[in-house]
Image (cartoon, rainbow, N blue to C red):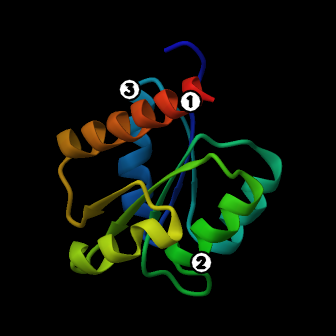
Amino acid sequence: MDKQIRVLVVDDEPRICHLILDVLVKEGYMVEVSFSGADALELVKKYNYHLLITDLEMPGIDGLELIQKVKKKIPDIRAIMITGNLIDDVAAWSHRYGIDNTMKKPFNITKLKKVVKQTLCTHKIVLEKI
């Protein structure tokens, strides 16, 4: 990797955050986790992330609101939404909220790695055209 890619993982289920953290660190990413949207917004004030992976349903600030707020601070951040809901519903919001990819819970590790890599590769291509 040219430079360290910084990823923020947000889910109110700590075991999901830690699972994603473990997988992505082994892939060479710099990963931080947050268990709430409010805490995630505090991290976004301190660091410039390349990728946000967030759960849809969380107490307080949900994933959609979080993505909107984070994109105001970091407009070119990529976003992956993880949800236990029907992906079709979330896909309808993707364009409106700037969601690059969606994954259904439970997800498998191979698919997670593939979706992260695909999302970041698309992001890199877009940045290179600017």
Rendered image: mark on residue 65: 2
**In this image, 28 relative to 105: left or right?**
right
Of the residues tagged 3 and 1, which is closer to the observer?
A: 1
| Residue type (three-letter) at the residue carrying disc 1 | Ile
Task: Please tell me whether residue 130 is drawn above or below residue 39 in the rendered image.
Answer: above
**Eye-nearest disc, 3 or 2:** 2
Query: In this orientation, which residue lies closer to the viewer: 2 or 24?
Result: 2
Asked whether the beta carbons under mark 2 and mark 1 sit within 8 Å of each other, the answer is: no
Q: Please, what is the three-letter code of the amino acid marked with disc 2?
A: Glu
- Marks 2 and 1 sit apart, C-alpha to C-alpha, by 23 Å
Q: Which residue of the protein is positioned furthest toward the bottom in this rendering?
A: 60
Quarter of the image for residue 38 reads bottom right
Quadrant containing the C terminus in the rendered view: top right
Callout 3: helix, strand or loop? Answer: loop
Question: Residue 60: x, y in percent?
Answer: 61, 87
Q: Nearer the viewer, mark 2 or mark 1?
A: 2
Q: Is residue 7 above or below residue 2?
A: below
> Residue 88 vs residue 18: left or right?
left
Dot 1: within a 10 Å radius of its alpha carbon, few (fewer than 14), some, or many (20 or more) residues?
some
Tell me the distance, in whole angstroms, between the alpha carbons under discs 3 and 2.
28 Å
Q: CA distance from mark 3 to mark 1?
A: 10 Å
Residue 5, label in figure: 1
Q: Please tell me which residue is depicted at 28% across the width and 81% down the height of the picture.
A: 89
Residue 102: image location, x then y, percent:
32, 61
Q: Which residue is mark 3?
A: 27
Question: Are the residues tagged 3 and 1 within 8 Å (C-beta)?
Answer: no
Q: Residue furthest front?
A: 129
Residue ID at (37%, 60%): 16
* Residue 32 percent coordinates (x, y): 59, 46
